[in-house]
């Protein structure tokens, strides 16, 4: 018989039952709308045909109840929702409008229809009792305050999964979800709960299209704990792909949530894998499911035990040739919830009208019915039935699939949020629960004592050499035997070498041999000695390089130039909260300075340094060496951070080699030069500098005497020339007086006669007029101050800045006379 025929047969039997039974004699009818899709569910089962026998059994048992429950008859009117929200809402409004007066809505297995109808319930004055699982969003009591679900919400399944993860301390999981509106919403709620619980979701995949390709991402990311939200029909296909990808065994744990309450359904005929392959892949997986039947052996409110009800239901299915529905037990108890709530609300309204002599309005009846459903408490075939925030409080079963049977290994109580595990029934394929990621075994690695002694001895020798050289430089600086230009920089450079070498002594110590407090102190001492030593040494070397570069550049102007356990070694190392920021600042300002130092050193390669046994080449090589060792030290320390002994060796050797190079390259020539002079080397070394200074002083003295003699000779010549000019001037004045005595007229006449002769002879006499007394007097008045002004500074007289002293004639004469007598 086809599915459509089964549907028709189920509806026919149900309608015949309702029509033939009718209301019992003296029983008050209570009309109820039954919202149900007349068709097959997602798994192919006939929902109506499978639920109808359970509803019929509930109605039959209700007739046997004593008053006041036995005084009422539940009359169900079936509405086909067709799983279409628009059609379902229209059918509901039509039924409410046509009458009779309905107070309660029964059923609802389609999530989109349930959500839409539940929002309209308060406006219609209806209360709905659903016997299907509700989506997590339906737990919002502000929007769905008139909806009561017999099956716990999908949110409770997610809470059970989170509790299970926390029980075994699984903090890294993967989530795979079958496509669909209900499961998609369930997936979002699960991820929110996992993040809130501190569980890292490594992979989230939706199972559509190539299921095996989706699951392969779990294997690529090495996900061990997998939460699968699947409908029952998709379980076989998922485990078939898990078998092909080897995603099973002791390293993996599958947790299945999201299906109904029907249990395992491994259909190997449709999955492409053999039955044995599916059993092997599913073995050990845990399924979260709602309890279908209670485990009590005592009769409930209906007078039936859970086992008695199940036997009666199966006999009805055999007679009607229908399929088992996963909702059969919840539908049975839902009818009892409706009957008890309606009878309680009706009795309360009657009592109020009888004793208070008032008419109860429809709104008050609806409010009484709502409170009656909320306060419902009884023992049903599914266990204790009571509601909290519109959801039925029950337990979520944890069933582990073991080879060919499902074993109950624990339960999650929805009312107390407690997880109870039966440990003697819970079985894992490995020695224990699967690990959510490879175990990390910490292995403490120490620096060997022999290595520390060898490196520390070399560092100690370097420190001693630096101290000896520092003492030598200080002593010779006091006696002015190494020059005064770079002694302070030498001392700073040696201080930097001393501090950086001392840091090596603290590098090999770890927490195994020291207390926590002492280890922290030594860490600080090590870092600061290395940082300050490098900074001081580089500053001194950079200062020397800059000074030589400045002099050299000035002198050159104008010239052309596979197991599951990972062993992770570790060791104590120095660190702080702001370690990265501190290193960034240090590297940020030292790297440009090192580059600038190299640039300056390149430009002073051929320069001469004003120090004994020193040259620009030595200074440039020292700068290059410091830069190279600094970069190598930082790189080597970072690259070998995983191996503390190697890191200690590399960093210490580079520091010591740098210090030895600086000591030998810059200070060794000075020591050799001083010591090479023999027994009287100290006096001879100081005498060399004294002789050089005396020779320079003698040259300056001789140059001064020569300039003085030349100045005196020029003064004598100027005086002779002045006397000759005086005599010429006297003769000229005498001639002028004679001419004046001869008469002015003759002179005028002579001038008139000789006008033409003078004009003709003017060009010839131009050169003679240059040496006339008047011209000579004018030139002397200008040249003499200039000559004295130029020569006086050269012989130690008035400087050029004292030119204002020659503004008067008296000062000029005094200066001139003084220069003649010196």
Image: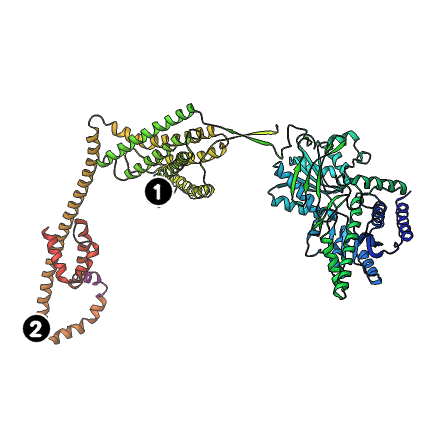
Q: Position of residue 226 (x, y in %)?
A: 68, 37
Q: Position of residue 613 (x, y in %)?
A: 29, 33
The disc, 2 or 1, on the residue closer to the chain's N-terminal end is 1
The one of 293 and 731 positioned closer to us in this rendering: 293
Q: Position of residue 799 (x, y in %)?
A: 19, 53
Q: Is residue 488 left or right of residue 99?
A: left
Magenta highlight on residue 445: no
Helix, strand or loop for disc 2 = helix
Q: Quadrant of the N terminus?
A: top right
Crowding at mark 2 (Cα within 10 Å: few <14, some 14-19, many 20+): few
Magenta highlight on residue 769: yes
Q: How is the image coloured?
A: rainbow
Question: Which quarter of the picture shows residue 122?
Answer: bottom right
The numbered mark at residue 741 is 2
Q: Is residue 148 above or below residue 767?
A: above
Q: CA distance from mark 2 to mark 1?
A: 83 Å
Q: Position of residue 581 (x, y in %)?
A: 46, 44
Residue shown at the point (20%, 40%) measured from the top left? 696
Helix, strand or loop for disc 1 = helix
- Residues shaded magenta: 761-771
The numbered mark at residue 320 is none
Q: Is residue 152 left or right of residue 821?
A: right
Q: Which residue is mark 1?
A: 546
Q: Is residue 355 visible?
A: yes
The one of 242 and 18 positioned closer to us in this rendering: 18
The one of 445 and 419 positioned closer to us in this rendering: 419
Q: Is residue 743 above or below residue 165?
A: below
């Amino acid at each position: 018989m086809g599915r459509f025929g089964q549907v028709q047969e189920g509806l026919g039997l149900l309608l015949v039952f309702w029509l033939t039974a009718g209301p019992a004699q003296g029983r008050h009818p209570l009309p109820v709308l039954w919202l149900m899709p007349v068709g097959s569910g997602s798994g192919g089962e006939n929902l109506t045909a499978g639920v109808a026998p359970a509803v019929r059994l509930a109605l039959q048992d209700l007739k046997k109840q004593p008053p006041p429950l036995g005084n009422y008859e539940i009359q169900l009117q079936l509405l086909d929702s067709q799983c279409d929200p628009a059609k379902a809402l229209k059918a509901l409004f039509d039924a409410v409008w046509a009458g009779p007066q309905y107070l309660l809505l029964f059923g609802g297995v389609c999530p989109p229809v349930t959500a839409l109808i539940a929002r309209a319930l308060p406006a219609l004055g209806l209360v709905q009792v659903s016997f299907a699982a509700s989506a997590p969003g339906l737990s919002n009591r502000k929007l769905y305050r008139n909806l009561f679900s017999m099956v716990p919400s999908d949110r409770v399944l997610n809470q059970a999964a989170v509790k299970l993860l926390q029980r075994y301390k699984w903090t890294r999981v993967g989530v795979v979800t079958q496509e669909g509106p209900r499961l998609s919403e369930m997936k979002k709620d699960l991820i929110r709960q996992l993040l809130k619980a501190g569980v890292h979701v490594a992979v989230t995949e939706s199972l559509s299209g190539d299921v095996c390709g989706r699951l392969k991402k779990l294997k690529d990311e090495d996900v061990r704990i997998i939460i699968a939200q699947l409908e029952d029909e998709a379980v076989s296909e998922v485990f078939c792909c898990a078998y092909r990808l080897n995603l099973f065994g002791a390293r993996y744990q599958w947790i299945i949530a999201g299906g109904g309450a029907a249990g395992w359904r491994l259909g190997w005929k449709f999955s492409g894998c053999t039955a044995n392959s599916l059993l092997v892949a599913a073995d050990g997986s845990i399924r979260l499911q709602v309890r279908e039947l209670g485990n009590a052996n005592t009769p409930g409110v209906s007078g039936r035990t859970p086992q008695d009800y199940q036997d009666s239901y199966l006999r009805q299915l055999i007679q009607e040739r229908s399929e088992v529905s996963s909702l059969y037990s919840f539908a049975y108890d839902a009818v009892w919830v409706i009957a008890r709530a309606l009878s309680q609300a009706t009795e309360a309204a009657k009592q109020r009208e009888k004793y208070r002599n008032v008419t109860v309005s429809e709104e008050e009846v609806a409010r009484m019915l709502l409170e009656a459903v909320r306060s419902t408490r009884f023992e049903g075939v599914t266990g204790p039935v009571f509601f909290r925030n519109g959801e039925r409080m029950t337990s979520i079963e944890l069933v582990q699939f073991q080879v060919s049977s499902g074993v109950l290994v624990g339960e999650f109580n929805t009312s107390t949020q407690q997880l109870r595990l039966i440990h003697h029934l819970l079985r894992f394929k490995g020695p224990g629960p699967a690990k959510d990621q490879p175990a990390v075994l910490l292995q403490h690695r120490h620096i060997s004592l022999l290595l520390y002694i060898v490196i520390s001895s070399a560092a100690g020798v370097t420190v001693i050499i630096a101290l000896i050289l520092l003492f030598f430089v200080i002593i010779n600086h006091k006696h002015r035997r190494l020059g005064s230009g770079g002694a302070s920089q030498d001392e700073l450079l040696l201080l930097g070498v001393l501090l950086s070498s001392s840091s090596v002594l603290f590098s090999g110590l770890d927490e195994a041999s020291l207390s926590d407090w002492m280890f922290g102190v030594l860490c600080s001492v090590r870092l600061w000695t290395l940082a300050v030593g490098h900074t001081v040494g580089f500053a001194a070397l950079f200062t020397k390089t800059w000074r030589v570069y400045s002099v050299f550049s000035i002198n050159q102007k104008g010239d052309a130039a596979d197991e599951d356990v990972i062993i992770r070694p570790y060791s104590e190392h120095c660190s702080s909260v702001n370690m990265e920021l501190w290193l960034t600042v240090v590297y940020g300002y030292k790297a440009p300075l090192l580059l600038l130092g190299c640039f300056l050193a390149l430009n002073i390669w051929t320069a001469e340094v004003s120090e004994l046994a020193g040259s620009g080449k030595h200074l440039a090589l020292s700068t290059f060496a410091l830069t190279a060792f600094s970069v190598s030290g930082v790189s080597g320390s970072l690259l070998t951070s995983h191996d503390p002994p190697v890191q200690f060796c590399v960093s210490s050797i580079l520091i010591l080699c740098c210090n030895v190079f600086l000591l030998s390259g810059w200070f060794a020539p000075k020591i050799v030069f001083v010591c090479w002079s023999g027994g009287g080397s100290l006096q001879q070394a100081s005498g060399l500098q004294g002789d050089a200074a005396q020779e320079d002083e003698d040259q300056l003295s001789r140059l001064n005497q020569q300039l003085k003699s030349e100045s005196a000779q020029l003064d004598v010549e100027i005086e002779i020339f002045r006397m000759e000019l005086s005599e010429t001037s006297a003769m000229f004045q005498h001639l002028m007086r004679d001419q004046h005595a001869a008469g002015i007229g003759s002179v005028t006449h002579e001038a008139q006669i000789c006008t033409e002769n003078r004009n003709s002879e003017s060009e010839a006499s131009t050169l003679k007029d240059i040496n006339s007394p008047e011209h000579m007097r004018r030139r002397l008045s200008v040249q003499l101050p200039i000559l004295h002004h130029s020569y006086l500074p050269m012989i130690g007289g008035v400087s050029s800045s004292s030119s204002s002293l020659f503004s008067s004639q008296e000062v000029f004469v005094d200066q001139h006379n003084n220069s003649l007598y010196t």
